[in-house]
Image (tube, rainbow, N blue to C red):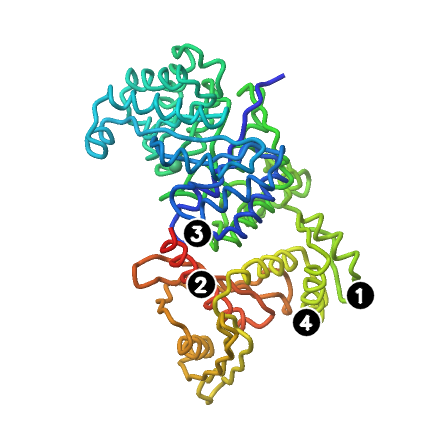
Amino acid sequence: MTRKIDILDTTLRDGEQSPGSSMNTEEKIIVARQLIRLGVDAIEAGYPAASNGDFRSVEEIGGIAGDSCVVCAIAQATEADIDRAAEALKSARRPRIHTGIAVSPIHLRNRFGITEDECVARAAHAVSYAKGLVDDVAFFAEDAGRADQEFLLRVIQAAVDAGATVINVADTTGYSLPEEWGARIRSIADNVIGIENTKLSVHTHNDLGMATALALAGVRNGATQVECTINGLGERAGNAALEEIVMAIQLHGAELDAHTDIRTAELTRASRLVSRVTGVGVQANKAVVGANAFAHSSGIHQAAALKSRDIYEILDPAQVGAVGSEIILSLRSGHEALRHRLVELGYTFADDEFDDVYQRFQEIAEQKKEVYDEDLESMVQERSRDVAAVFTLDALQIQCGDPLVPTAVATIIDEGGVKHVVSATGTGPVDAAYKAIDRVLTVHGDLEEYVVKAITRGIDAIGEVVVRVKSADGKVYTGRGSDTDVIVSSAKAYVNAINRMITTQRSREGR
Ligand code: MN
């Protein structure tokens, strides 16, 4: 039997730190449910000391995860941060505090202004303090890729001696080359006394396009846990991509002496879900989950693929769940059919909630003959977005064409329940709609990016619009909206982005 490699997913913590991909608690819960279906060993759910929103997300994910996986909260090496993490993890059945400190000379000197001895003392104190609150304590060595190796061994030894159950070695800046990184991990595995009783973990970044290679170099050299994110989402160029690591381990398990417990058929759905929730698209040529990952266009390749797919394909699309669902619902589908399919997709509703869902489903089915899984997911996620609605688009009427002046009349309901009917003209229908909506909003946002795409097939497909809106303080908020009418989708997406801006600003003030 090969070694079991734990997969810690940090999409909800490191992934969420990537620009414009912030998620609210409801969205994080949707992602967490999919991570549980995927079978990850641990979910890093957030940084409770950073904001009330993060605290609540960790708390709620701890509640839903039960025994299915470890729920981890990150904390800097201070008692206040660690206390806050422990508090947020109270509802978790398998809580883990992930604390630590940066270990490279540049961090010690320029960020903290401390000596190596002080760094070791802080690391040891943080771990033993956390051990007083929970049993499972991970220690992270930040920027280990640029640390002095002798010193790195010393800090890690201190953390192990203080009772750490996981040692997470982080190439925070994505600086390393795979062989050098592997040698670092090997030297930790060989030299730290007691390391064999802990999980040795690697956390790698993609600044040089090598995050996956670094993670696998870690596995080859003794790591038994990998930290990664769906779609490689994360700070700057991102983290190591979960789907790449899992499939590489699956294909090369013998050479790596490794296996994971991930249900690979859930990978494509996880990728699409995270992309839809964050509004961060997946490049078409992305490994494993990109739209073209299994597409052949050259004639020679196509001809060969018809004879036998494996001539040019090392992975089977079915293995990663990249084959379209054959279940298509329609207006004739009853309550039970819809409920059954939603449960299979991972969504459960109370009876009174379900009546609403069914009603919305019928509206969609009336407009489209065939309702695909992607339509259902878009519908369910739209509901969760409504939870935080400050402003709601109630109605939108557009007049446009050639030679008409594009004109929009919008009805917006504010959180006090007051209806505002506003109108504006613009250079086009979307511009007119946004200008009308702007007359009601209490905050201003600049539109940075506007993307429209069809979620499913056919001319009657639901069109989804993703917008990025920049606030006065320079933060970027993503908004999404979907409808069979793309102008309505556009208006919903804009209102959604503004609602996120307002709720985020409020939760920051309430901190
Ligand atoms: Mn990171």
What amino acid is labelled 3 in the image? Ser
Mark 2 against mark 1, which lies toward the viewer? 2
Are circles 2 and 1 on residues that touch, CB within 8 Å? no
Residue at the spot of label 3: 21
Q: CA distance from mark 3 to mark 1?
A: 37 Å
Q: Tell whether circle 4 marks a residue whose Cβ is less than 8 angstroms from ligand 1.
A: no
Kindly tell me whether residue 482 is visible in this rendering.
yes
Determine whether 110 is above or below 317 in the image. above
Element assignment for label 1: loop
Marks 4 and 3, the one that precedes in the sequence: 3
Marks 2 and 3, the one that precedes in the sequence: 3
Mark 2 against mark 4, which lies toward the viewer? 2
Element assignment for label 3: loop
What amino acid is labelled 1 in the image? Arg
Q: Position of residue 209 (x, y in %)?
A: 39, 37
Q: Quadrant of residue 233?
A: top left
Determine whether 388 is above or below 400 in the image. above
Kindly tell me whether residue 205 is visible in this rendering.
no
